Image (tube, rainbow, N blue to C red):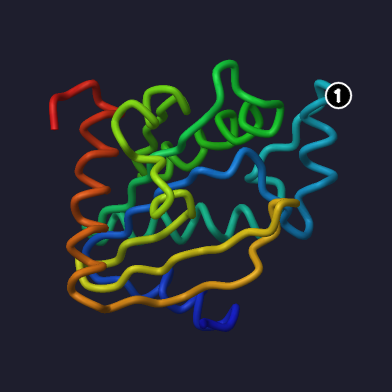
Amino acid sequence: MLTNAEFAEQLRDYQQTAYRFEVQPFYTVDGEQESFQRFLEGRPVSPLDVEEDRAWLERVRRQTAEGRRMARVRVHKDPPTDYQRWMRWRGDFNTAAGEAIHYLTVERATEAGLLSAVAIRDWWFFDDSRLMVLTHDPGGRRIHTELITDETELDRARALWDLALCTARGENP
């Protein structure tokens, strides 16, 4: 299990690639509630105006300018939940900073076999050598994070990432 500091270290210290697979319908993250509520009220707050969000976007911009790649595949309901609509709006800022974000519907992800019992948790896959699996409680709060380096699990993550990315791009895996 990783501490929050170790979690942040993984996001900071990858060398070449950081791939994220997201399946939660919403996340409960300290400090996001006001911004989310303002979005719902039609008064969205730019991530550039929130210190923590701005720091993240600057990190993404710096890392991608260094030649590192960051990408994610988000599995969303169709139509997206309010939270997912907010995340899509915020995702435009991540994309502008250099991150590639792809979307799949739950239906399409299920058809592709991406939502089997072993793949219903979120994860980050770093440098083809470290898998960070995130477990969330039913309220969307991350409750623990596990770092996996077992080659069998890494092979599975590679295959799932390739399948998720191909499916999101509309390509045949």
| Residue at the (77%, 60%) spot, across then down | 30
Q: Residue furthest front?
A: 117
Name the residue located 17 percent from the left edge and 62 percent from the top edge.
155
Please name whichever residue, 100 or 84, is drawn nearer the observer in this view of the structure. 84
Image spot of residue 48 (x, y percent):
63, 45
Q: Residues within 10 Å of mark 1 (few under 14, many from 20)?
A: few
Query: Which quadrant of the structure image shows residue 100?
Result: top left
The amino acid type, in three-letter code, at marker 1 is: Glu
Name the image quarter holding the C terminus: top left
Q: Name the quadrant containing residue 98.
A: top left
Q: Examine the rendered structure and indicate whether residue 158 appears above or below residue 47.
A: below
Please determine whether, in this image, residue 59 is positioned above or below residue 152. above
Nearer to us in this view, 43 or 127: 127
**SS for dot 1:** loop
Q: Position of residue 153 (x, y in %)?
A: 26, 68
Looking at the picture, tell me which residue is in the foreground, 152 or 126: 152
**Residue at coordinates 65% horizontally, 69% vertically from top-left?**
143
Check disc 1 and report the residue beneath it. 41
Q: Position of residue 131 (x, y in %)?
A: 33, 68
